[in-house]
Structures are given as C-alpha cells and as structure tokens.
Image (cartoon, rainbow, N blue to C red):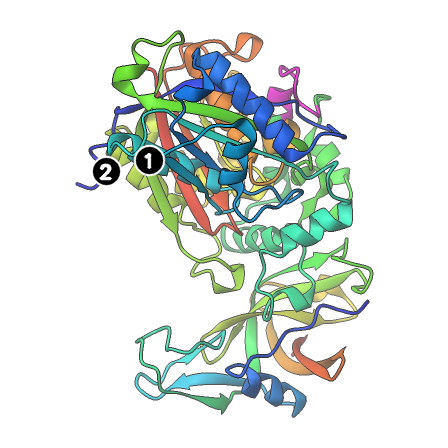
C-alpha cells in the first residue's frame, strides 16, 4: 500500500514536472492574463484555450485548514494538517501544512511551498508556515 | 417565471422507510424494495400502476444501471426510468425531476426509492474511502482528506469569519438527539449535552465524533402523483409547493465561498415558486451530515442572518417545541444515515408530520415545511417547500 498518488495526464504533466523540479507552476491565460488552478483545457475565467505554464511565487495564505485525527488509511499518519491555500497569484488549492505543532496553524497565516516525496517518483507541493 | 407550472401540481401520496440502522444480511436492493412496496401499500396502489421510477445507485451494491435493475427486480415496466447521482442532494433533486415528469406527462405515478448498506455492506475503511472519493482524484485525494476533514474546512472557515464556536456546532447535535429521543426507529436516542459532544473524540478539528453523522443501513420510498389524482387517494396529500436547486462547485477546493453555499439560491428559488418565505415554515429538515452544514443552511435558507447561525442554534430554537424544530426525526446525526439516501428519511418524516401522523414527535399544527439536501461537499443543493394546502 502507498499514499494516494495523483495520476498525471498530458495536460497536467507540466505541473507535476515542476513539482519534481521544486517549482510550483500554474497555468496563465494568454488572453486575460489570469492564473487558474486546477489545470484545464480552457481558461476558467474567459473561456479561451491558449494557456501557458508559469512558475509562481509559492507564497500564499491559509484560507482554511483542519487537523485530521483519524486518517484516511494506514498510509497517512495522523495527525496531519489538510488545508486550502489561497496563493498570492489568486487561485486556491488543497495541500498539507507541514508543521510540528498543528496548533500554530491559523486561518490567514502566511505559508510558503515546499515539495514532499509521495512515493514512486511523485513530488507533491506542501506548505510550511512562513 | 420559471417553474410556476410545478407549484401545487404534484403530491406525495405514499411514503415508507425500510428497516433502518444496523441491518446485516440484507442487500441494498432488498432494503430498497422493502421501502418501495411499503410506499405503494401506503398509497393504496398496485405496482403495475407505477409508470415512473427514479432511484440512486447504492455504494454498497453498485450497479451500472440501477433504476433499470430495480424495475426488473420488481417486475415493473416504466415509461420513465432513471437513476440520479448527486450525492446526498440526489434525493430532493430527484423529487424536482419526478414532479416535472408528472406535470409534462412523462409519467403519472412516480415511485422514488433509494437504499444503501453503508454500515453492514462495507467495512468502515471501505465506507470512508468510497465517500472520500468525492474529492478530486488528482488535486485533493492525495493529501488524504476524509469526508469529516472536507467539512471541517467549512466549519473552520465559519469560525474564523464569524466567531462561531465548537459549542454552537455542538448545540445542533444536542437538538437532533432530543428529536431522536421521541423516535423509535432512531439509532441513537440517549440524550447528550454540549459537554458530551466536546468530550467526544476529535475526528478533524473542529469536528468531534458527535458532530458527525451516523453510518447506517436503510432506505425509503415515496410515491408521487398529480395533485388531481391525489385527491382520490387514501392518505392526506402532501403537496410540492416549491423546488429550487443551486450548484456552485463540486470539489471544496474550488468553492467560491466556504461560508455561504448554494443553499441560498436553492432556497430562494424554492421560496419564490411557493410564494412563501422562511417565516412561514413550521419546521425544517436540513442536511446534517455534520453539524456545521446545518448551521450554514440555517443562514443560507433565511432562518437567521448570515453569521448568526451559531447564536440561533445555541438558543434552543431547533429542539422539540422550539421556534424552528429541525430534523424532527433525529436526522442523520441521530436517526439514520445510509449514505446517499439519507435525506429520504427526512422526506418520509416530513410526510408524516404534514399528515399529522407523527405521534409523539408531532409538530403542532404542522402545515408547511422546508426540506433541504446537499451533496458532494456543500456542492449541490436542493430545497423543497412541502405543505398540506395546494
């Protein structure tokens, strides 16, 4: 058994390659210049289909979080923090917050991305309190 | 105005629950059939009179074409037959669809039936995993969120934005248990206090065990006909006065707003169709997979101001005898939660309340009710206004 691994697609491959290279990347629309997440074949803001990948700051704030005390499976060692991160560039994403003290996590806290080994060559973005 | 053709045109004329709670050794289909035949008997109808069937797939016994499989099991041959999938919100969106089918002549007698065996048909781990599969497989699930964790994100955001407390959420669990105490089919009937809720095991901060719904077996069914036909039937009809839906997102990480949900639009649309507002509701059945969902629904469905759900819940208004009894059967928190069919039990309860057949649990002079269900993670919402007067 292992942790749940994301299944990459051709469209999302640049995101996951970025993670393996230690970079957080988002799609940016060539038409309206907005960022979006999760990756899609069209811009979720303006509907145009010309999107390119850009490295982003990796900075954001905690929109919400929880401390999971009863894990989803034996491969996830509780307690662990699951959070919704509002990235500085606008989009929101789910992630983990890596911390020795879950009690330090607050809504609104500033965070910065790191990358964690999820197994089988997959690196996932996680966040630390900054 | 859209939907005016539905108001008062369709009635629920039969309702029944299956065996509920912990029911090992019976498949979801068997439970579904039990409820279906019970609802038909309650309506005084024979199965050959059913020409419309709507169901929902069972997680513990999934089938590719569930409604067709059930029609075959029952040996009925409907001209309108479909299984819908919208999580817990399925129930009431199905009623919306079924009512539309009757009004447009797609069917005259629609049987809506659902059941599942989340308790006995799946291991605890399987139940957790299948329900958590609502999360995005690539961008949410890998982080290991459980269903309580998804809803805890909503609760935590509400606490941060409005100062709602764990005690406020706990008051909802306490009220649900007070209703369940009067319900012989409820799984959990022992009274609890706010302190009991806070002392129960933390599952995903801020949600304790008693903030979370049960995991149960069971199902229910209702029979719908035109209001015209309902007049000749043996039980007091329960009329559909309003129906409204709202769909904001599927995955919680894509929610436009964590503390206000599409229950707001669903309610507005249902109230508009009914020509009645929240103040006209004698009681409400609100989706209670977790205590914070009820709190947000109270606000979004107009029973109190935004941000004041905690105060409203803590006031005792939701309890038996309160100004707005909520989940008069005990809800999914204390009565039964068999997965997708959970709200069917709120629906049958509402039928008994509005017929004045609820015995010890009867809300005095019950005339009109708001029933609401949501699916996904506060994703899809349906609100119905039901009443004794068409």
Q: Which residue is mark 2?
A: B3
Could you tell me which residue is drawn at 64 percent across and 50 percent down? B131
Q: Which residue is mark 1?
A: B243
Q: Is residue B200 left or right of residue B354?
A: right
Give percent across and percent down for residue A72. 74, 57
Q: Is residue B257 left or right of residue B63?
A: left
The magenta segment: B177-188
Q: Camera-side residue: B120 or B362?
A: B120
SS for dot 2: loop
Whether residue B178 is in magenta: the answer is: yes
Residue that sits furthest to the left in the current view: B1
Residue that sits furthest to the bottom in the current view: A21
Could you tell me which residue is drawn at 53 percent across and 20 percent down? B37
Q: Quadrant of residue A84?
A: bottom right
Give percent across and percent down for residue B371. 43, 31
Q: Is residue B45 above or below residue B201?
A: above
Q: Which chain does tag 1 point to?
A: B
Whether residue B99 is in magenta: the answer is: no
**Magenta portion: prevailing SS class:** loop
Mark 1 and mark 2 residues within 8 Å of each other at the beta carbon: yes
Q: Camera-side residue: B264 or A63?
A: B264
Q: Is residue A16 above or below residue A94?
A: below
Q: Quadrant of the C terminus of chain B?
A: top left
The answer to whether one can see residue B295 in this image is yes
Badge 1 or badge 2: first in the primary sequence: 2
Q: Quadrant of the N terminus of chain B?
A: top left
The CA span between labels 1 and 2 is 8 Å
Specify the label residue B199 is tagged with. none
Give percent across and percent down for residue B71. 50, 33
Could you tell me which residue is drawn at 68 percent across and 33 percent down? B27
């Amino acid at each position: 058994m292992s942790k749940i691994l994301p299944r990459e697609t051709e469209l999302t491959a640049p995101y996951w390659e970025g993670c393996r290279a230690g970079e957080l990347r988002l799609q940016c629309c060539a038409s309206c210049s907005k960022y979006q997440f999760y990756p899609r074949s069209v811009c979720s803001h303006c509907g145009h289909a010309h999107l390119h990948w850009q490295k982003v700051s990796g900075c954001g704030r905690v929109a919400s979080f929880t401390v999971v005390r009863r894990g989803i499976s034996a491969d996830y060692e509780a307690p662990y923090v699951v959070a919704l991160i509002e990235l500085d560039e606008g989009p929101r994403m789910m992630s983990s917050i890596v911390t020795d003290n879950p009690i330090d996590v607050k809504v609104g806290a500033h965070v910065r991305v790191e990358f964690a080994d999820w197994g089988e060559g997959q690196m996932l973005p996680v966040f630390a309190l900054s | 105005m859209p939907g005016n053709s539905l108001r008062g045109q369709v009635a629920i004329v039969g309702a029944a629950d299956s065996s509920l709670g912990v029911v090992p050794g019976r498949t979801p289909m068997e439970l579904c059939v039990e409820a279906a035949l019970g609802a038909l008997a309650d309506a005084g109808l024979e199965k050959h009179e059913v020409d419309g069937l709507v169901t929902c797939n069972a997680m513990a016994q999934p089938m590719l074409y569930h409604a067709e499989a059930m029609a075959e099991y029952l040996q009925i041959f409907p001209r309108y037959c479909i299984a819908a999938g919208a999580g817990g919100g399925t129930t009431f969106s199905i009623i919306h669809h079924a009512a539309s089918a009757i009004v447009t002549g797609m069917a005259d007698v629609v049987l809506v039936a659902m059941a599942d065996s989340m308790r006995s048909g799946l291991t605890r781990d399987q139940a957790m995993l299948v329900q958590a599969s609502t999360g995005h497989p690539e961008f949410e699930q890998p982080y290991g969120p459980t269903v309580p964790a998804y809803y805890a994100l909503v609760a935590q955001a509400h606490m941060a934005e409005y100062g709602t407390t764990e005690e406020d959420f706990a008051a909802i669990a306490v009220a649900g248990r007070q209703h369940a105490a009067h319900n012989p089919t409820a799984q959990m009937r022992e009274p609890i206090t706010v302190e009991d809720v806070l002392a129960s095991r933390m599952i995903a901060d801020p949600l304790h065990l008693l903030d979370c719904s049960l995991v149960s077996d069971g199902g229910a069914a209702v029979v719908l006909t035109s209001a015209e036909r309902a007049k000749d039937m043996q039980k007091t009809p329960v009329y559909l006065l309003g129906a409204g839906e709202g769909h904001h997102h599927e995955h919680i990480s894509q929610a436009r707003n964590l503390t206000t949900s599409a229950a707001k639009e669903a309610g507005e649309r249902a109230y508009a169709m009914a020509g009645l507002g929240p103040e006209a509701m004698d009681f409400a059945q609100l989706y209670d997979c977790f205590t914070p969902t009820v709190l947000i629904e109270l606000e979004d469905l107009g029973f109190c101001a935004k941000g004041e759900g905690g105060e409203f819940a803590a006031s005792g208004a939701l309890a038996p005898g309160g100004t707005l009894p909520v989940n008069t059967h005990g809800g999914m928190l204390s009565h039964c939660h068999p997965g997708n069919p959970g709200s069917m039990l709120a629906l049958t309860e509402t039928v008994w309340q509005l017929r004045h057949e609820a015995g010890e649990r009867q809300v005095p002079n019950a005339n009109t009710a708001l029933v609401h269900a949501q699916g996904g993670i506060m994703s899809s919402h349906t609100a119905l206004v039901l009443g004794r007067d068409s």
